[in-house]
Image (spheres, grey):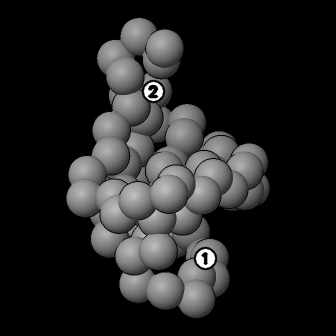
Amino acid sequence: MHLSYHDRSETLSFESEFNTICSTLSSNDALLLIANETGREYLYNVKCCRLIGIHRFGHDIRTIEFSPDFK
């Protein structure tokens, strides 16, 4: 995935067995959330390019976003 923010760009390399449906970047550019077609979401720390966690939802995901106040 290619990230472009604050006049910089980086490529974050990750593997998924299934197609990516949607992704979103947090307002402070620190976190990237990626959802695939099976309802699995991957949370990445963009600053250090590390996977923080994986969450499996019991349903299809169509859109995702971070809450403005992070709650």
- Asked which quadrant contains residue 65, the reply is top left
The percent coordinates of residue 70 (x first, y second) are 48, 17
Which residue bears the numbered disc 2? 28
**Residue for point 63% across, 52% down:** 55
Query: As displayed, is residue 55 above or below residue 65?
Result: below
- Identify the amino acid type marked 2: Asn
Residue 7 visible somewhere in the drawing: no
Residue 21 visible somewhere in the drawing: yes
Q: In the rendered view, does 38 fall on the left or right side of 60?
A: right
Quadrant occupied by the N terminus:
bottom left
What secondary structure is found at the residue carrying circle 1? loop
Q: Nearer the viewer, residue 52 or 47?
A: 52
**Residue for point 62% across, 82% down:** 15
Q: In the rendered view, does 40 fall on the left or right side of 3?
A: right
Q: In the rendered view, does 25 fall on the left or right side of 56?
A: left
**Residue for point 41% across, 10% down:** 69
Which residue bears the numbered disc 1? 13
The percent coordinates of residue 68 (x first, y second) are 34, 17
Query: As displayed, is residue 24 above or below residue 69?
Result: below
Q: Are marks 2 and 1 in contact (CB under 8 Å)?
A: no
What secondary structure is found at the residue carrying circle 2? loop
Q: Nearer the viewer, residue 37 or 46?
A: 37
Work out which residue is located at the far left of the displayed protein and give it: 62
The percent coordinates of residue 53 (x first, y second) are 72, 50
Number of numbered markers: 2
Query: As displayed, is residue 68 above or below residue 44?
Result: above
The percent coordinates of residue 71 (x first, y second) are 49, 14
Which numbered tag is attached to residue 60? none
Q: Crowding near pointer 2: few (<14 within 10 Å), some, many (20+)?
A: few
